[in-house]
Image (tube, helix red, strand yellow):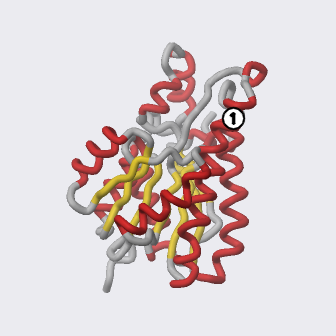
Amino acid sequence: MENPYSMKGQTVLITGGGTGIGLGIAKCMLQAGADKLILVGRREDVLKEASESLGEKASYLSQDIAQIDEIPKFAERVIAGHGQPTCLVHNAGINCKKPFLELKDSEFMGVFDVHIRGALEITKEFAPSMIEKSNGSVLWISSMATVMGLPLVTSYSMAKSAMHGAVYNLSAEFAPHGVRVNAILPGWIESAMALNSFKGDEPRRQKVLGRTLMGRMGKPEEVGHAAVFLCSPASSFVTGSLLTVDGGASIGF
């Protein structure tokens, strides 16, 4: 019997794939047997180091996905150099930590450009091939910040919440064509973005650990294993779902 969690034969494109959760997902995809990994991000040196650490199945492309007009050319580069992705992981993200009343419109929209507009444009480029072949998976990396009120991260929380609308509506459109769309809601994970959010704010860090039932932050690979499940045949009857991986933080007291 074949392993239902196998990613054999799959080409996985991961935005924000050079560090943190994205790199953790990449490692788990490799462990599950993915044929190819395409890491995407803004910092070429970081991507190069990550790609080399993963081995010959991994490659990378430098691209700021907030540059919406560049996405079609980016897709051409992906296909020409690496082939057509069969699995998209929308993991790229930025944050703007400041009070809502001090938040500039350009900062607000900058967060949306990365989390939503760029991801949607990438989906537009690669989903038609998945639909044509009746095979593919689109995975959004959201956040448990969408299910609780958190100060200072309004733009981030709202952008992540918009992902859920994309999951519900795209799954309804794509499901008849054999393409699944899901999301993971990570809690506080040991990543540069999370650690930066705690900088100079020890009470915030203690509050996070205090309400996380498992008493610790998660590891990127713990999100990665969930990603493998949602992109593999093991979840062949799962679409339009939001999977929380937060150590119990969203229900903690």
Q: Residue at x 21, y 56 (%)?
A: 55
Q: Residues within 10 Å of mark 1 (few under 14, many from 20)?
A: many
Q: Residue at x 69, y 59 (%)?
A: 166
Which residue occupies the foreground of this view, 76 or 40? 76
| In the displayed structure image, the side of residue 129 where residue 41 appears, left or right | left
Q: Position of residue 94 (x, y in %)?
A: 55, 36
Which residue occupies the foreground of this view, 211 or 17? 17
Q: Position of residue 225 (x, y in %)?
A: 40, 57
Q: Is any atom of residue 184 visible in this view?
A: no
- The quadrant in which residue 253 appears is top right
Q: Is any atom of residue 36 visible in this view?
A: yes
- Going by the picture, which residue comes out furthest to the right? 101
Q: Amino acid at mark 1?
A: Ser
In this picture, is 243 found above or below 126?
above
State the residue position of label 1. Answer: 155
Helix, strand or loop under label 1: helix
